[in-house]
């Protein structure tokens, strides 16, 4: 691979150990690998004309001057330090982080309390940083006026030089030629050509060359015509259109029931943008990047770049390069696509904006939707958020924006809007648009409830499928229709229980119970543990430990019982009750790759498979008109989680999966099995009443001072030694208390206390939670503690701003 040496031969002789004051300018560099402050460097004269903000450079670090990689974040005339070192080399002459993304990165670094270098590592894909698959061609051009070159040719005796310059004279002025081609055509060698460059006759400039630079999908496909919008869609579109065409920042929530045609509204808004020569970013949950969904974009637009996790590094790099050159009109991708270096962005769409998978669970712990809103603000473009079950965060902001004029000032400041600018004055404008009905007059699916307490009283044995669900499944299949069964828990059973010790088997490394998984290939024969036919393993879903299933209780040697349910257990029951049924289990155990999932959905689409049984993977996005029945095996699995969003998750999941039914001409039915039929969340889900649910849940959050009414920061500390952990937690808590003192009662601090899962993978875990009516005080507290270095460079301390999970 051509390294830096051959690329920038003149740069390597920059001295690497200079520590002296020299005349500026200086470069501020954010080093990768989580150093929390940027460092200032002198710029060697040779690099000065080439160096740009956003480039990746090599710079000496530490006492040993180890060459480290980092990004130029600013070039300025002064420098705060008396002594600085010099930048060693430009690692990549491309600007990897254009100015607006740099601004976004700085905001993320502040807001998510993460070193800027770490944020930039997230923004620039590793394939791009490593220049995977990237070649450079070196372009040669004349450096002097043609007449002078002509004169040199006449004077010089060196025939090779004459040939080189002569060939260059044949080019149009301002044109350049590939160095290898020039060598071939002039009969000279590459070193001879380089010599001419050193003498100043010619210039050699490296230019990016990605062999086979992919044209984005749909580049030649005829554009599919737009659908005629229905009345609701038209109303939303008419309201959006001026905001989209005139540009300017706005946040728009398109709240449309499942099957109401939200995507068509996105597509037509994007059309407006593309027609004006601008570009779009569309974020979708990773799982929605199926060919079926992607086709809706590629059929409509030319130049669609699809960023999904299945890309090879080279493909990813090509797409990035193409996007940054402005060749992609529409970028569709999961969370990190929000960092696509799209020039002249015109709109950002976030589909299924409520999805928890938009949140990254390692530093920077950012939320793709919130970063999308911030990017929209920086780029001054509209942001379109869509969902049938909006996050309460977004819904609350929309309602707050509506009520803004009517409310007392302090309450306006308390609204979470202010966080995006950190200045309460710049409240973004939030707008609500609704699609209350399904397209083509289709009915919402009818939801019926089965009370599993009653069910169990009248049937012998364990039944995961109620009689009603069994019956409907049978008639659905007989009618030639298809069904989806949801159980949001993988494995076979989540408790392996010893009745005599009164204890389930726990993970050795975690404070959790082990889940029993049947071996792949073990036939569903309805075997029970008592019959000794259970072969399989115990899995920990947190540390991924795997143990064999013991024959008997490890403590008392008595018999073990399998309790609780998982998809494998439903699979077993289905096979027993419907021996002829063609069904497939879809969970992260059975679907190893995106390809597996794609293939399976293809078989479901052409009706080879009659029933899909799976976890939340199958709950969203799927649009198959022949699905008329959805069964929710247990509506309660998420309700019991020790997390204040349990009710919200439950409502979302039930509503989303119910939305898969009845998208064709036949009406849809949903059977919701539950032990808690009167629970208000379950009740709201039965009515599919988002607004009612949101009102109730927001009231609850208000009375308990939880997000989105308040803002939250969660800090998790971990250590293998419980005593050390406790000590460190108390030290940090004390620092936070000090830092929070100037905020008075605006910041409330809880902890340190053990996390709900007290130990994971051998590490004990404590948490400290801070809550405030608005984001700014929390940001100030974090900044003060960070300034003292108490959060820096410590992989044992995870700061999570706006956490989505509290486990
Ligand atoms: P949502 O995302 O709101 O669940 P979709 O955008 O997936 O809904 O639309 C559901 C189905 O309705 C899709 O097959 C789509 O092609 C179709 N559709 C959307 N808008 C219209 C329309 N105006 N007329 C007819 N069909 C439409
Ligand atoms: Zn474990």
Image (spheres, helix red, strand yellow):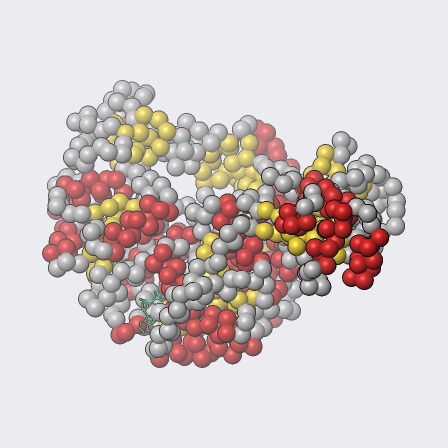
Q: Which of 518 and 181 is in front in this view?
A: 181
Quadrant (top left/top right/bottom left/bottom right) for the C terminus: top left
Q: In this view, does 412 lie to the left or right of 685?
A: right
Report the side of 297 relative to 121 (left or right).
left
Q: Is residue 710 visible?
A: no
Q: Where is residue 593 in the image (x, y as percent from the top left)?
A: 37, 43
User: Does 379 sit above or below residue 594?
Assistant: below
Q: Residue at x 43, y 34 (%)?
A: 543
Looking at the rendered image, the quarter that the N terminus falls into is: top right
Residue at 60%, 69% (x, y): give it: 380
In this rendered view, identify the residue nearer to me: 308 or 622: 308
Q: What residue appears at the point 49 percent right and 55 percent down from the top-left corner?
A: 214
Residue 146 visible in the snapshot: yes
Q: In this view, does 210 lie above or below 663?
A: above
Q: In this view, does 498 lie to the left or right of 209?
A: left
Say which quarter of the image contains residue 631: bottom left
The quarter of the image that holds ligand 2 is top left
Query: At x 63% / y 66%, what residue is drawn?
Result: 424
Circle count: 0
In the picture provided, is 336 more to the left or to the right than 387?
A: right
Q: Nearer the viewer, residue 577 or 579?
A: 579
- As rendered, which of 123 and 393 lies closer to the eye? 123
Residue 35: x %, y % from top left: 68, 41
Q: Report x, y in % for residue 404.
A: 55, 73
Residue 472: x and y in percent read 15, 56
């Amino acid at each position: 691979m051509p390294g830096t040496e051959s690329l920038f031969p003149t740069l390597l002789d920059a001295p690497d150990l200079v520590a002296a004051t020299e005349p500026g300018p200086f470069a501020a560099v954010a080093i990768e690998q989580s150093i929390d402050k940027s460092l200032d460097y002198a710029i060697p004269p040779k690099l000065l004309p080439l160096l740009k903000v956003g480039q990746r450079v090599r710079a000496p670090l530490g006492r040993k001057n180890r060459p480290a990689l980092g990004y130029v974040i600013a070039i300025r005339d002064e420098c705060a330090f008396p002594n600085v070192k010099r930048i060693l080399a430009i690692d990549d002459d491309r600007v990897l982080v254009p100015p607006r993304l740099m601004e976004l990165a700085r905001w993320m670094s502040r807001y998510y309390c993460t070193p800027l270098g770490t944020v930039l590592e997230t923004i620039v894909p590793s394939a791009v940083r490593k220049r995977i698959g990237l070649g450079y061609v070196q372009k040669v051009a004349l450096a002097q006026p043609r007449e002078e070159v002509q004169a040199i040719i006449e004077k010089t005796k060196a025939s090779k030089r004459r040939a080189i310059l002569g060939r260059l004279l044949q080019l149009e002025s301002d044109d350049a030629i590939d160095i290898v081609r020039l060598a071939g055509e002039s009969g000279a060698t590459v070193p001879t050509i380089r010599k001419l460059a050193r003498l100043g006759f010619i210039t050699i400039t490296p230019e990016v060359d990605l062999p086979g630079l992919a044209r984005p999908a749909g580049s030649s496909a005829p554009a599919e015509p737009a659908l005629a919008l229905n009345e609701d869609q038209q109303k939303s579109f008419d309201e959006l259109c001026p905001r989209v065409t005139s540009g300017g920042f706005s946040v728009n929530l398109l709240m449309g029931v499942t099957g109401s045609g939200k995507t068509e509204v996105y597509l037509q808004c994007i059309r407006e943008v593309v027609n004006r020569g601008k570009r779009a970013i569309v974020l979708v949950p990773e799982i929605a990047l199926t060919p079926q969904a992607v086709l809706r974009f590629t059929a409509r637009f030319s130049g669609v770049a699809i960023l999904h996790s299945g890309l090879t590094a080279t493909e990813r790099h090509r797409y990035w390069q193409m996007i940054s050159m402005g060749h992609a009109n529409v970028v569709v991708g999961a969370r990190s696509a929000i960092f696509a270096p799209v020039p002249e962005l015109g709109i950002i769409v976030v589909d299924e904006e409520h999805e928890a998978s938009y949140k990254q669970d390692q530093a920077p712990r950012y939320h793709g939707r919130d970063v999308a809103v911030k990017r929209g603000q920086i780029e001054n473009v509209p942001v379109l958020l869509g969902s049938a079950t909006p996050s309460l965060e977004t819904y609350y902001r929309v309602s707050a924006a509506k009520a803004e004029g009517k409310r007392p000032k302090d309450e306006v400041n308390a609204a979470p809007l202010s966080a995006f600018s950190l200045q309460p004055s710049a409240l973004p404008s939030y707008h609500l648009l609704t699609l209350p009905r399904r397209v083509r007059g289709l009915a919402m699916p009818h939801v019926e409830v089965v009370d599993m307490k009653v069910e169990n009283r009248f049937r012998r044995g364990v039944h995961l499928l109620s009689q009603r669900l069994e019956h409907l499944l049978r008639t659905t299949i007989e009618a030639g229709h298809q069904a989806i069964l949801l159980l949001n828990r993988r494995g076979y059973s989540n408790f392996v229980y010893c009745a005599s010790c009164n204890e389930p088997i726990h993970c050795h490394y975690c404070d959790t119970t082990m889940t029993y998984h049947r071996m792949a290939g073990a036939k569903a024969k309805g075997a029970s543990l008592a019959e000794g036919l259970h072969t399989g393993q115990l899995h920990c879903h947190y540390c991924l430990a795997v143990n064999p299933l013991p024959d008997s209780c490890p403590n008392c040697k008595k018999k073990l019982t399998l309790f609780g349910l998982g998809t494998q257990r439903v699979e077993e029951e289905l096979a027993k009750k419907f021996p002829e049924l063609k069904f497939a289990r879809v969970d992260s155990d059975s679907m190893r790759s995106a390809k597996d999932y794609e293939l399976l959905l293809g078989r479901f689409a052409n009706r080879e498979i009659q029933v899909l049984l799976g976890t939340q993977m199958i709950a969203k996005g799927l649009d198959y008109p022949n699905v008329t029945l959805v069964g929710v095996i247990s509506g309660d699995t998420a309700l019991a989680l020790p997390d204040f969003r349990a009710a919200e998750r439950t409502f979302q999941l039930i509503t989303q999966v119910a939305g898969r039914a009845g998208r064709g001409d036949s009406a849809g039915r949903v059977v919701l099995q539950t032990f808690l039929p009167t629970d208000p969340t379950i009740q709201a889900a039965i009515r599919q009443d988002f607004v009612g649910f949101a009102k109730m849940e927001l009231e609850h959050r208000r009375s308990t001072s939880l997000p989105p009414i308040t803002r939250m920061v969660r800090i998790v500390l971990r250590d293998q030694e419980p005593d050390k952990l406790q000590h460190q937690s108390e030290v940090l808590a004390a620092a936070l208390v000090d830092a929070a003192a100037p905020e008075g009662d605006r910041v409330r601090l809880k902890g340190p206390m053990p996390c709900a899962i007290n130990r994971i993978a051998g590490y004990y875990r404590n948490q400290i939670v801070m809550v405030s009516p608005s984001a700014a005080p929390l940001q100030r507290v974090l900044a003060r503690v960070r300034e003292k270095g108490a959060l820096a460079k410590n992989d044992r301390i995870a700061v999570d701003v706006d956490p989505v999970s509290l486990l």
